[in-house]
Image (cartoon, rainbow, N blue to C red):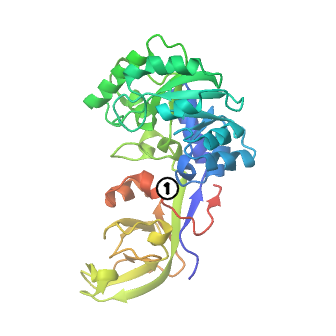
């Protein structure tokens, strides 16, 4: 088969988005999330483009090894922390700061260890109920960490479950709980991820609503890649620039009479005599099978709809009667002119899933 779907990654867009975050939170340091292969954009590409961040947040120690092997010397924060003594040792070898969210992890820091010391980000469960200590446990946990010779410094962090909706009562409750936990704590704190950060700016209550939560560290993720963290709109509405354009090409063009069915299951029938095109993109590329007919793609400056079920390597589009598109023409699956947020809404999913799902069967192109 001819060349298939390929991601184009813009380092300048990544840098622009980081600068925007820094402008929005000028008093804060930025911990840039590059987990999940930098949300599908490439771990090393993102780390280099985000070199002005104050630190990088990762989810796997393998990511730390890759970054250190490539000469990346920025602060690394392991978001789920180590789960065994061997992982603790590897985290130390990679000079990672670690999140501690459980009593089992506390035990890893008891005793003499290897002599390595860690900056510990103590995670507080204020209502998301995914990871973290309960607020009433924090005082005792802090005392235990302060007594450990393996702990060099301690920071507090939490994670908002509904930060994309500041009016949600859970958000307000989480804020109040975290503020109580932080009272009297003189170290760094972190609460605001992408939706919280942009809600702070968008909220009519502004600082009266959010207080100073996240003022020490902010933890942007999705927004760094130019994607809106909210259910409606796109990153461009927030001043962000999409860092990924996912493209392919037409590999066949043919006429189709009215009433003929297309693709597996024959789920789409031509409503009129038309011209269809086959594009070299399928679910093995990360172009999900759950995209319905009528999902838009861009060809020669116009939007045309998907027609039928996405296959493993191919999909079909309705080019329309009289179309003059030809084999080899470029097809944009998402990018600046067709926001990934719109494609995600068509698939009843979230843009995180689409961009992290890009399989990179063709090596990504890096540049502008």
Q: Is residue 70 visible?
A: no
Residue that mark 1 sits on: 356
Quadrant occupied by the C terminus: bottom right
Q: Residue at x 52, y 51 (%)?
A: 39
From the viewer's side, name the closer residue of 285 and 134. Answer: 134
Location of residue 275 by image quarter: bottom left
**Where is residue 107 drawn, in percent x and y?**
54, 31
Q: Residue at x 66, y 34 (%)?
A: 75
359 to 49, vertically: above or below: below
**Where is residue 285 drawn, in percent x and y?**
50, 68
319 to 114, vertically: above or below: below
From the viewer's side, name the closer residue of 249 and 129. Answer: 129
- Name of the residue lying farthest toward the top: 184
Location of residue 353 by image quarter: bottom left
- Classify mark 1: helix, strand or loop: helix
271 to 7, vertically: above or below: below
Quadrant occupied by the N terminus: bottom right
Q: Residue at x 67, y 27 (%)?
A: 112
């Amino acid at each position: 088969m001819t060349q298939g779907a390929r991601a184009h990654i813009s380092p300048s867009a990544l840098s622009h988005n980081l600068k925007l975050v820094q402008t929005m939170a000028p008093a804060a340091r930025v911990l840039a999330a590059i987990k999940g292969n930098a949300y599908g954009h490439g771990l090393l590409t993102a780390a280099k483009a985000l070199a002005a961040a104050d630190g990088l947040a990762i989810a796997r120690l393998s990511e730390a090894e890759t970054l250190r092997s490539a000469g990346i010397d920025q602060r690394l924060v392991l978001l789920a922390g180590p789960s065994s003594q061997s992982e603790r040792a590897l985290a130390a070898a990679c000079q990672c700061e670690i999140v501690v969210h459980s009593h089992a992890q506390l035990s890893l820091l008891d005793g003499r260890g290897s002599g390595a010391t860690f900056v510990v980000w103590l995670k507080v469960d204020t209502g998301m109920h995914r990871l973290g200590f309960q607020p009433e446990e924090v005082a005792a946990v802090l005392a235990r960490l302060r007594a450990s010779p393996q702990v060099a410094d301690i920071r507090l962090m939490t994670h908002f479950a509904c930060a994309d909706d500041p009016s949600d009562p859970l958000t307000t409750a989480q804020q109040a709980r975290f503020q109580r936990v932080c009272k009297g704590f003189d170290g760094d704190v972190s609460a605001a991820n992408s939706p919280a950060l942009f809600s702070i700016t968008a909220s009519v209550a502004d600082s009266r609503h959010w207080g100073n939560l996240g003022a020490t560290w902010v933890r942007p993720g999705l927004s760094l890649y130019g994607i809106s963290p909210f259910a409606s709109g796109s990153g461009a509405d927030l001043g962000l620039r999409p860092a990924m354009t996912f493209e392919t090409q037409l590999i066949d063009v043919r006429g189709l009479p009215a009433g003929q069915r297309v693709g597996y299951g024959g789920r789409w029938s031509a409503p009129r005599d038309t011209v269809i095109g086959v594009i070299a993109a399928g679910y093995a590329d990360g172009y999900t099978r759950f995209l319905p007919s009528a999902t838009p793609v861009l060809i020669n400056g116009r939007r045309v709809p998907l027609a039928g079920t996405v296959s493993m390597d191919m999909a079909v589009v309705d080019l329309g009667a009289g179309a003059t598109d030809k084999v080899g023409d470029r097809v944009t699956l998402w990018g600046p002119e067709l926001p990934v947020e719109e494609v995600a809404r068509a698939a009843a999913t979230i843009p995180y899933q689409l961009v992290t799902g890009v399989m990179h069967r063709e090596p990504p192109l890096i540049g502008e």
